């Protein structure tokens, strides 16, 4: 699913506590995947509101850039402590956060972001840079938030769409890497108003059985590919975002597609994925089509 030969895990840093936690997670992810780690800081000196004085005769930008380089150096050191076997490099890249990260994602196996930031990633709150990057990146994006429960399952939202299949494949891969159970959630709704009309208008049991079939078919091929991954299916009537957020409380990772259909209709960030990014109790991975897989 995410195997690009030699592609690194990339992590964004800005000197914040959240970013350092993202570095630790990224280092472990790189070690698990046997991939190098690239630490990146986006640098626009005019965004800094701290007072850093450059050396006499040096341009104003030099003082800020020194701080940016220190952010990267500290992150590289931290990554080395967590995963000494991983090859780690770091760079200060000129540009705004979102464009820099989207460019980095083109050649990455995984992009890791903290949920909050400062400095060069000012405003890296869920709903701004993280959402923009998650919606448009050409690789899966892991947003580090909440609490990852090491013994919890990998949770994935499934709706039967092609992109949902990619998210499901990524989730199976992660569950195999982590030796974890996979929990596949499929929510469905009936678009009518008065609940007392349901028995007359629909055979609810038949609809539920059909939704069970959709999930079973979506999982079947991946279960054959990953026979050692235990799978628990959850099909229920209700809002998919709410179900995923509830289930995330016991998960070590939650995986969603960037857009979907059916009960997950409009799963472009701003609906289900957006809600999960905001409210998940565990780290979230957003998966979307890579550039070579898309027609847009």
Image: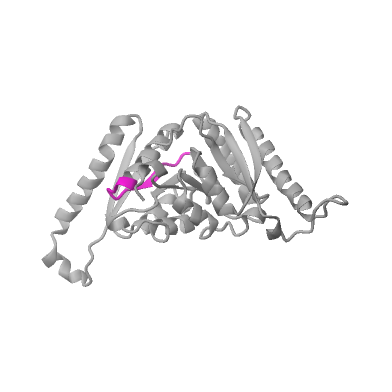
Q: Give the mark count.
A: 0
Nearest the eye: 31 or 202: 31
> With respect to residue 273, does 32 lie above or below?
above
- In this view of the protein, can residue 29 be seen by the observer? yes
The answer to which quarter of the image holds residue 265 is bottom left
Name the residue at the left extreme. Answer: 200
Indicate left or right for 6 with 255 as reference. right
Residue nearer the viewer, 120 or 95: 95
Q: Residue at x 70, y 55 (%)?
A: 45
Residue 150, given in percent of the width and then of the height, sits at 49, 39
Q: Residue at x 41, y 44 (%)?
A: 291
Picture quadrant where residue 193 is located? bottom left
Q: Which residue sits at x=47%, y=58%?
A: 279
Image location of residue 75, percent across then percent down: 67, 41
The coloring applied to the image is: one colour
Q: Residue furthest right?
A: 56
What range is drawn magenta here? Answer: 151-163
**Residue 293, position as x, y percentages in the image:** 36, 42
- Is 197 on the left-hand or right-hand side of 75? left
The vertical placement of 252 against 274, above or below, is above
User: Which residue is most to the bottom?
Assistant: 194
- x, y percent for residue 107: 50, 39
Question: Would you say residue 64 sits in the magenta stretch?
Answer: no
28 on left or right of 194: right
Q: Is residue 28 left or right of residue 236?
A: right
State the quadrant of the N terminus.
Answer: top left
Residue at x 40% of width, y 47% of height = 288
Is there any visible trace of residue 251 in the rendered image?
Answer: no
């Amino acid at each position: 699913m995410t195997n690009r030969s030699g592609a690194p895990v990339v992590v964004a840093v800005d000197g914040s506590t959240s970013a350092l936690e993202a570095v630790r997670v990224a280092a472990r992810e790189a070690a698990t995947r046997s991939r190098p780690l690239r630490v990146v800081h986006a640098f626009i000196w005019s965004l800094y509101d701290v007072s850093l004085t450059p050396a006499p005769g040096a341009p104003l930008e030099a003082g800020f850039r020194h701080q940016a380089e220190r952010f990267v150096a500290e992150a590289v050191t931290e990554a080395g402590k967590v995963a000494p076997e991983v090859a780690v490099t770091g760079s200060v890249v000129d540009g705004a956060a979102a464009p820099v990260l989207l460019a980095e994602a083109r050649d990455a196996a995984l992009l890791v972001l903290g949920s909050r930031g400062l400095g060069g990633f000012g405003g890296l709150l869920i709903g701004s840079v993280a959402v923009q990057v998650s919606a448009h990146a050409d690789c899966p994006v892991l947003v580090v938030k909440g609490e990852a429960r090491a013994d919890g399952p990998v949770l994935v939202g499934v709706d039967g769409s092609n992109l949902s299949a990619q998210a499901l494949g990524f989730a199976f891969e992660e569950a195999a890497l982590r030796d974890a159970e996979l929990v596949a959630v499929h929510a469905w709704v009936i678009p009518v108003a008065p609940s007392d009309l349901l028995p007359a208008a629909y055979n609810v049991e038949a609809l539920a059985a059909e939704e069970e079939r959709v999930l079973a078919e979506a999982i079947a091929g991946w279960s054959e590919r990953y026979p050692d991954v235990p799978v628990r299916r959850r099909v229920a009537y209700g809002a998919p975002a709410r179900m995923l957020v509830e289930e995330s409380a016991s998960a070590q990772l939650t995986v969603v597609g960037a857009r979907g259909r059916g009960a997950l209709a409009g799963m472009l960030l701003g609906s289900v994925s957006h809600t999960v990014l905001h409210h998940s109790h565990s780290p979230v991975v957003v998966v979307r089509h890579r550039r070579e897989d898309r027609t847009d």
